[in-house]
Amino acid sequence: MNADTAIPSTPPEGGGAAQAFDAIVIGAGFAGLYMLVRLRALGLRARALEAGDGVGGTWYWNRYPGARCDVESLQYSYSFSEELQQEWQWTERYPRQDEILRYINHVADRFDLRRDIALNTRASAAHYDEGRQRWSVRTEGGERFEARFLISAAGCLSAARIPEVTGLSSFQGPWYHTGNWPHQAVDFSGQRVGVIGTGSSGIQLIPTIARQAREVVVFQRTPNFSIPAWNRPLPADEQKAWKAQYAAHRQKARATRSGILYDYSLRASAEATEEERQQEYERRWLRGGANFTHAFNDIYSNQAANDSAAEFVRNKIRATVRDADTATRLAPTDHAIGTKRICVDSDYFQTYNQPHVSLVDLRETPITAIVADGIRTASRHFPLDRIVFATGYDAVTGALDRIDIRGLGGLALKDKWAHGPRTYLGLMSAGFPNLFLITGPGSPSILTNVVVAIEQHVDLIARCLDHMQQQQLSVAQPMMDAEDDWVTHVNQVASKTLFTKSNSWYMGANIPGKPRVFLPYIGGLQNYTTICEEVVAAGYRGFRMTSG
Ligand code: N01
């Protein structure tokens, strides 16, 4: 397949002549970079459009103090190049944001990817021209690009969200969102800081800011379960030993439900005595990380099993936080453990024992307004110099919704998904030919080590494009019945778990008006991969591929 020469095209409106490529990739984070590697290997001319002025996606934007990945360094990295995985040296058990960003930049340089990336280029519209079988992409800066294939690497947690609170524009101090943090270090010394939000970002940020600030007021709507990270430097011999078996570790990880080498128990909670259960929780607590919720194999599906694990964590919170009232407010009781993304922290609960850190329970006293010098709740006024929003994302579909994507007959993807996203395998959506979604809704994506999910999807897309090249096929899209069956399957699998009972971003519940649908596929990465392989082996069953 060769790049087409630049031909003037119509939609989206305006602009000069389009720059023509075989494939346009939206985003230059983990997904976009690896997609470029694979497209180049296929001999396709590609361009990645990246809104930031650097590569890295999530790790480019999330520069907030304390930002760190909760998957271990040696696992949260690419596996596609043996040289790369051998040469890169990680310094800590859990990698800090700046280390991951250095790693991603190293990848961009090592594979000479920058020449195929347009920085400061945010895609605003992408329309499919059925007659010419081309996607026409417009950017916020008014540039136009054309390609046969459009591949979204826009990310699942990239559409940062500031909630609507009256009066934000009247606040006279600086305010920040964790997902759009300034590039210059922010100094909180001597400041009174208000933090809204206690999800993964808030839980990492609060202890770090508390080390600098004069006063920290945490505005909590929902308490979260969190497990200690027990982060530590990564000794050279441990790293060397792991790398000696890297390929085997990676293969083993891909064969798990989350793409992470956790210690998955095969036992149901009720098979253990109460004493054994407590011992098992304690063992995992001391080991640290999200491995905790795999203590028994029914924690996500059996309420009693979940309650038992949740109570262990609540007891830990009560034992850590000295003020009994604060401890009660920090101990989650409104959702099953793990059904809102479990957090991994360093000294989060201990932070509330410091005299300059306080907790405001927004369920009791909601924020009524942000005012010039702080935040007002139903019961009092909190004078603040700075406000941090750790209020999360319009997850999974948000980044796509922010682009005006139109397929056959001018149908907007946003309209097609008005009652919840509809995809086949989380990879494509009927009516949007040649639009591929890396870690799209209905795929394991954010329930996994996302780098593993990304590599699986990118490899699958690359194989599909290769197949199309070999067979001289030019257009692919899913068949409607295959898509309908997949959506039904995604929902059925989710309904067997406790996840659908929670008001989480997995369910779209954090965004007012968003349909209540479980967004990722919870059938397990290993099962999902098997299904994909069966689809490929059956000649891309469920996809319609045509020529010319
Ligand atoms: O966002 P969140 P996040 N008024 O949506 C609250 C990944 N991640 O950025 O629960 C008051 O989880 C909201 O309250 P509630 C990870 O997958 C990974 O923290 O909706 N509060 C909640 O407390 C994670 O799950 C890492 O009631 C409001 C918080 O804001 C995902 O990103 C690190 C509010 C938002 O929590 C998102 O995490 C960071 C309002 N109007 C992120 N609106 C690691 O790898 C929202 N909130 C470690």
Image (spheres, helix red, strand yellow):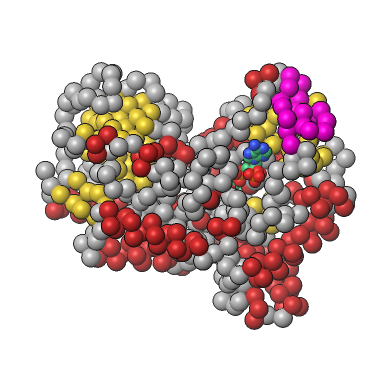
Give me the residue at 76% from left, 59% from top. 314
- The mark total stands at 0
Measured along the vertical axis of the image, is residue 379 above or below residue 247?
above
Percent across and percent down for residue 146 are 25, 31
In magenta segment, residue 373 = yes
Would residue 74 be found to the left or right of residue 15 on screen?
A: right
Give me the residue at 27% from left, 53% from top. 480
**Quick one: 449 or 314, which is closer to the camera?**
314
Percent across and percent down for residue 140 are 39, 23
Q: Does any portion of residue 83 appear in the rendered image?
A: no
Give me the residue at 46% from left, 54% from top. 520
Give me the residue at 36% from left, 66% from top. 530
Would residue 163 be found to the left or right of residue 462 on screen?
A: right
Would residue 136 be found to the left or right of residue 331 on screen?
A: left
For the C terminus, the quadrant is top left
Q: State which quadrant residue 226 falls in.
A: bottom right
Measured along the vertical axis of the image, is residue 494 above or below residue 404?
below
Measured along the vertical axis of the image, is residue 325 above or below residue 170?
below
Would residue 217 be found to the left or right of residue 306 on screen?
A: right
Percent across and percent down for residue 52 are 46, 30
Q: Main secondary structure of the magenta part?
A: strand
Percent across and percent down for residue 249 are 48, 65
**Quick one: 369 or 139, which is closer to the camera?**
369
For the N terminus, the quadrant is top left
**Quick one: 240 or 164, which is closer to the camera?**
164
Q: Which residues are magenta?
A: 366-382
Q: Quadrant of ligand 1?
A: top right
Q: Does any portion of residue 527 appear in the rendered image?
A: yes
